[in-house]
Image (cartoon, helix red, strand yellow):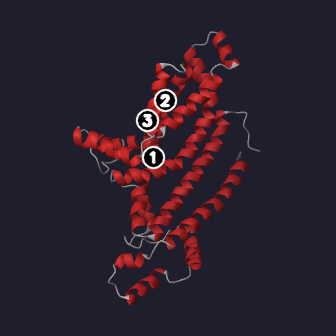
Amino acid sequence: MFGYFIRRMFLLIPTVLGVTLIVFSLMHVSGDPIRLLFGPNVSEEKVQEKREELGLNRPIYVQYWNWLTRMVQGDLGNSIHVQDRVSNLIVARIGPTFELTVSALLLTVLISIPAGIISAVRPYSVIDNAARFVALFWVSMPYFWLGIMLMMLFGLVLDWLPISGRGGPLWTLRGIRYATLPIVTLGLPPIALFTRLTRSAMLEVVNEEYMRTARSKGVGETAVIVRHGFRNVLIPIVTLLGLRLPWLFGGAVITETVFAWPGMGRLLVGAVMERDYPVVQGVVVVIALVTVLANLAVDLTYTFIDPRIRYN
């Protein structure tokens, strides 16, 4: 497994490089950040002076190489608009984003997996039909629309929960109240995918021979389903967890904007609007690294789920 891990780590290098090249190229054809910074009435001399100060008057490939060499050394550059290091901005925002995404993923799993198992054990029953209908309903909801509806219902009409900002860490009551609506907004739409995947995977194993053998030995139905059935459908579920992570970051960008959540998604939206190249590039690189490392962790988890899997 160690050799496989090393090979995968080397394969991460071209993936991250490809992401940085695409983002760098797209940002540099999107407009002039200096004119946006100073406004339309700024003199050309001042624009050229600022470009030279930031190195934006050099050829694009030179700018990319300089930025790449600094990034390898851990320097993501300085923000054009905030006048602070990009790494400082990301460190200040990465904690709230992980709180939001991890909590939303946990909510998705806690609801969808039991619903999928129950639907598979009782196929085409009232519970099964209701679970599939509710899951399909939630997956049809765009993040921004769902967030606004929850904000209006629980924040404005019922006045139960705050509708914007972050109240602190999730282990405090104030933090939980402020985080509830963003977490629910981000966690509900993926429930349909996990529910349907769990249901279809469980339907394939629920009547397998080893399941019938366990029942014939007097093992309780709950133990048969959980210990023998669910364990054999974990691999596709864990795979979907890894695939959904970048989608969660994409949803977090919208959710954080709707609820004014101080995370990397909101930082990214503001940087794109201001054409703050270093911030956009730094945030995208961090998201790309988290995504590829999460997928690597998923691959390594397979060996613990199924001991028959070996990476040679």
297 or 237: nearer the viewer: 237
Residue 103 visible, this orientation: no
Position above or below: 42 against 92: below
Mark 3 Cα shell of 10 Å, populated few (<14), some (14-19), many (≥20): some
Residue 101 marker: 1
User: What amino acid is at disc 1?
Assistant: Thr
Q: Earlier in the sequence, mark 3 or mark 1?
A: 1
**Residue 5 at x, y percent in the picture:** 68, 50
Q: Residue at x 46, y 39 (%)?
A: 139
> Of circles 3 and 1, which is in front?
3
Q: Residue at x 53, y 37 (%)?
A: 193
Q: Which residue carries the number 2 mark?
A: 132
**Residue 116 at x, y percent in the picture:** 52, 28
Residue 192 visible, this orientation: yes
User: What amino acid is at disc 2?
Assistant: Arg
The N terminus appears in which quarter of the rendering?
Answer: top right
Q: Residue at x 59, y 29 (%)?
A: 200
**Separation of residues labelled 2 and 3 (CA atoms):** 8 Å
Residue 183 marker: none
283 or 91: nearer the viewer: 283
**Separation of residues labelled 1 and 2 (CA atoms):** 24 Å
Mark 1 Cα shell of 10 Å, populated few (<14), some (14-19), many (≥20): many
Which of the 4 quarters of the picture holds residue 175?
Answer: top left
Q: Secondary structure at mark 1?
A: helix
Residue 137 marker: 3
Q: Is 58 on the left-hand or right-hand side of 228?
A: left
